[in-house]
Image (tube, coloured by chain):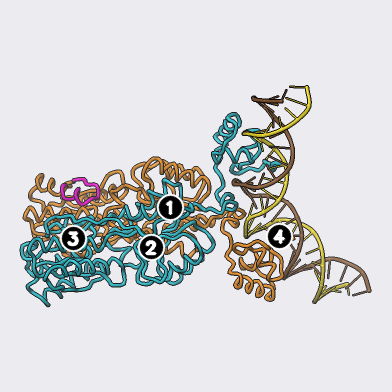
Chain colours: A cyan, B orange, C brown, D yellow
Amino acid sequence: MSRASTGRGRPTLDSVAARAGVSRATASRVVNGMPVTPTSAESVRRAVEELGYVPNHAARTLVTQRTDLIALVLPETTTRVFSDDQFFPGVIQGVSQQLELADKQLVLMLAGSAASHARIERSVAAHHVDGVMLASLHGADPLPAALTRIGIPVVCNERSLGPMSPPYVGVDNVGGAEAAVRHLLTAGRTRIATIAGPQDMIGGIDRLTGYRNALRDSTRRSIVAVGDFTLDSGYTAMRQLLEDDPRLDAVFVASDLMADGALQALRQAGRRVPDDIAVIGFDDIARAQYTDPPLTTVRQPIIEIGRQMARQLLRLVAGDDIEPKMTLPTDLVVRQSA
Amino acid sequence: MSRASTGRGRPTLDSVAARAGVSRATASRVVNGMPVTPTSAESVRRAVEELGYVPNHAARTLVTQRTDLIALVLPETTTRVFSDDQFFPGVIQGVSQQLELADKQLVLMLAGSAASHARIERSVAAHHVDGVMLASLHGADPLPAALTRIGIPVVCNERSLGPMSPPYVGVDNVGGAEAAVRHLLTAGRTRIATIAGPQDMIGGIDRLTGYRNALRDSTRRSIVAVGDFTLDSGYTAMRQLLEDDPRLDAVFVASDLMADGALQALRQAGRRVPDDIAVIGFDDIARAQYTDPPLTTVRQPIIEIGRQMARQLLRLVAGDDIEPKMTLPTDLVVRQSA
DNA sequence: AACAGCGAGGTGAGCGGTTAAAAATCGATG
DNA sequence: CATCGATTTTTAACCGCTCACCTCGCTGTT
């Protein structure tokens, strides 16, 4: 028998069924789009409409074991969440678009302290979410391994440096950097330095590799300074480079934010860009078109990264298996700085 | 009787109870920190430990009617999510910090299309979340009213322009703008213009009001151009102002991003800042310290906005009632542009 | 010694759905 | 017209947890 449905509060499937004159099971079928007689489908649909019925998510989750929740974990290092590079907003936007298509909700988890790390693991262990996306990991973060062990689908942004590398969606950092440096070589630049990113992040490592690759094919030697993707570090690194080798005529900078800092250092040092020295950045952040001069840079498709991460994860959640490595193209955007 | 606990899969409260030699109810009490005999508390705790038990969230939600999920709704207007003002990342960070203390999870919903609007309403109607924070609404958004009608706690960022205004956490836009303009007056500036923000957003409206208030007390007349908070619009507005009144000696700009654009227009027009013309922005975004010259601006405590929104909402969710209007202070940060 | 009072722990009824299995319905067929 | 197979619908058993209520053993009182 269907349960007594006298109770007030929001309507349940029982009240819908009662009103439509069918059993709860039939009502459930209609709600879930399973085949039923047009007659009962119609009456159930009307009852749903009249009562303003909305399925109870918790009840459904309890039996189906699906939460329709997808987590996006971001490391809450001030460096990145609060920098201007717009990486996180972009990823969030892409992820959000894709999840919306699949009618999943996005749970955002900022992993700052060790406490939040533990909290995330607990939450995932409780199967509070169906899958997890990890973005912008530093070094050999233990999280990918921990989550994989729990046995929940995981997708990363860029390959993980740790022991266990889950499927990932990355961009062609190496190729992009190579293209940038080749552009400088083609323009006849001879002393080409780089301001690399942190060497415990894929972006930092691979862009430096690309720089080295491109120079290896030429006769130029490599000149390297290291920053941490912040504007200040770009400024400092540029001053350092100028001091070490005043005759530089080009610099490939591993992020636009650092490139912006580098431009300031160059301006202060009285160097004209691109006449005296060419500058190429990486990321193509919004500001790149407003620097002085507008910045030539390597664009990475940030929103697309988010979309693809979500797409891959959704497949994993659905039980399909996927190509574990996905690399999105980068391309050189030529403006005035090189 | 306790249910047979032979089933494989992750441990349930039943298996914990069985292992600890107590009833499910007692195990539940221990897990939820209610008073029990030290003896049974200890044995339950050990069982939890050994089995790696984590409570099933859906089951708990089903009976308690709490989801421990809090939604943050952001309008996905490209203008803001993808601008450099870092408002959203800041709010997210503040919200996240506060929610973590209360052990709630954050569900992020981007409200772009009409479809996503409907989706959000549906999700809230299903009591998928315990409460909702709405940020940065445009005009008379119908969402506050719709959500309030559903009967779920809502907190906004800034008061809503619509018919129904939920409790909100805002900043002292008027006072900040007044302080900025007074600073210009004190410095002896005589022709003080403003580049206002969009007049369908509280920030845009109130900052213009503050500008007018401050001028009303003086003998200066007001000169107004309107932008939409983007850099480009600041640039355009500044050119317009210069054309209309070439003898301007100061401008109060309703956002740093627009101020950045204004600085570029001024530089291009050959005006020296602050010698020929003083510029004051609003927001104190990260970039403000790197503009040329560094920007004098009105700081608003973005992270704190997020924290307070979350704090207020959590109280509402807990059933406490709160002061429906909360205004956080803004303060003038004097750098070199004025 | 009998009994009220009290606190700890057990019992069982839900919470609101899904879904496998059983029952009912129905058109087609011999 | 009874029978059979194919659908559609109903029944009822969960999913895993909380909580109101009841039981039970113990102490303190008269």
Mark toward the viewer: 1 or 2: 2
x 59%, y 34%: residue: A36
Under circle 1, the secondary element is strand
Q: Answer yes or no: is residue A214 visible.
A: yes
Mark toward the viewer: 2 or 4: 4
Mark toward the viewer: 3 or 4: 3
Q: Name the chain letter of the residue that bears numbered label 2.
A: A
Q: Which residues are magenta?
A: B225-236
* Mark sitting earlier along the chain (3/2): 2
* Mark sitting earlier along the chain (1/4): 4
Residue underneath mark 1: B133
Residue underneath mark 4: B3
Instruction: Residue A112: give x, y in percent of width and height.
Output: 40, 68
Above or below, B131 relative to B331: above
Label placed on residue A140:
none
Residue underneath mark 2: A74
Instruction: Residue A109: give x, y in percent of width and height.
Output: 43, 61
Marks 3 and 4 sit apart, C-alpha to C-alpha, by 65 Å
Under circle 4, the secondary element is loop
Marks 3 and 2 sit apart, C-alpha to C-alpha, by 29 Å
Marks 2 and 4 sit apart, C-alpha to C-alpha, by 40 Å
Is A58 a magenta residue?
A: no
Which kind of residue does numbered mark 4 sit on?
Arg
Above or below, B202 relative to A48: below
Quadrant in the picture for residue A309 = bottom left
